[in-house]
Amino acid sequence: MGFDCRGSFANLSRMKFPRFFSLLIVATVFAFSLRAADKKLTVGFSQIGAESAWRTAETESIRGEATKRGVNLRFSDAQQKQENQIKAIRAFLAQGVDAIILAPVVETGWEPVLKEVKRAKIPVILVDRGINVSDESLYTTLIASDFVAEGRLAGEWLAKKLNGKGNIVELQGTPGAAPAIDRKKGFEQAIAKNPGLKIIKSQTGEFTRSKGKEVMEAFLKAEGKNVNAVYAHNDDMALGAIQAIEEAGLKPGTDIIVVSIDGVKGAFEAMVAGKLNCTVECNPLLGPAAFDAIEAVKVGRTVPKKTIVKDEVFDQSVAMDVIGSRKY
Ligand code: AHR
């Protein structure tokens, strides 16, 4: 007896094989998506350095969140140098990371490397500082504070404290960095309404305590008792300036008013001690928002181009009450 294979194959291909193949395809797709969901994300984080307590808090927030979410984090400390950040980004590219978190030291000079990242279709999450690029599609999203608003808040607070009259010395952040540019701008806008307020000296203290102290010593040598107030672009420089004021035999917080930005624990301690008058908060705890953005992008959701973190002003009158609840 012969076997009519033509008929059997015809039957199978008409009925069983199509169903079998569809089931196989569905099962394969399902298995692949399960594996994709299970796959550990690898994220590169290019950090500026460790110049301030604020930055250390930011690093800890991103590292801690990565651990919490089971993300494999590749961390690189650029020691304040843009060239090191560019090298780190290229290394992340070579390693084939799933996303890059970048805290850019300065605003300009990112186009060439970010074009390479875009070609590799790797999302870039900018944290804390913005960049100047003609093509905004070179990064996915920016999560940061409004630095102009912070400078404005510091200026308004100081104008009120000095009753619109006095000589101010300014300690600027890293030259070319978004917070240095914007905090200067916002502060100047605020004090411009008071013709009696003058910035008599302004120089970079590079966002560090030691440089803040060194520059303040020079300011005091040049201007002596002419100085009524210090505006520092971050708390670390203010804490350095406080040391310089004390070493010059003056009382910080009383003889010279001190206002700064960040809201780190050390600033609250200095306010409780009566040496710092006011700090404008700049929240460094950006880890949760950064990884939320990465996870959203990875499942194809669109994220806002910019997320502004809300900040508050704290002065000596509230320092004692809130110091215990500060998280950084
Ligand atoms: O970009 C945020 C600024 O950078 C913080 O104010 C400062 O402390 C840091 O180094």
Image (cartoon, rainbow, N blue to C red):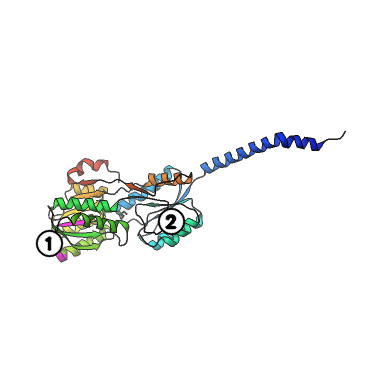
Q: Is residue 204 left or right of residue 253?
A: right
Q: Secondary structure at mark 1?
A: helix
Is any part of residue 207 visible from this angle?
A: no
Residue at position x 20%, y 61% in the image: 216
| Residue 226: mark | 1
| Distance CA(mark 2)–CA(mark 1) | 47 Å
**Which residue has dot 2 on it?**
138
Image location of residue 274, percent across then percent down: 16, 49
Q: Secondary structure at mark 2?
A: helix
Q: 160 or 228, which lies in front?
A: 160
Residue at position x 22%, y 46% in the image: 314
> What's the amino acid at mark 1?
Asn
Image location of residue 92, percent across then percent down: 47, 56
> What's the amino acid at mark 2?
Leu
**Quarter of the rendered image showing ligand 1:** bottom left
Quadrant where the N terminus is found in the figure = top right
Say if 301 sits above or below 226 in the image. above
Q: Quadrant of residue 229?
A: bottom left
Q: Is residue 200 left or right of residue 6?
A: left
Residue located farthest toward the bottom when viewing the structure as drawn = 222
Per the image, is 229 magenta? Answer: yes
Is any part of residue 83 visible from this angle?
A: yes
Residue located farthest toward the right when viewing the structure as drawn = 1
Q: Earlier in the sequence, mark 2 or mark 1?
A: 2
Looking at the rendering, the stretch of residues picked out in magenta corresponds to 221-232
Q: 269 or 277, which lies in front?
A: 277
Label 2 CB less than 8 angstroms from ligand 1: no
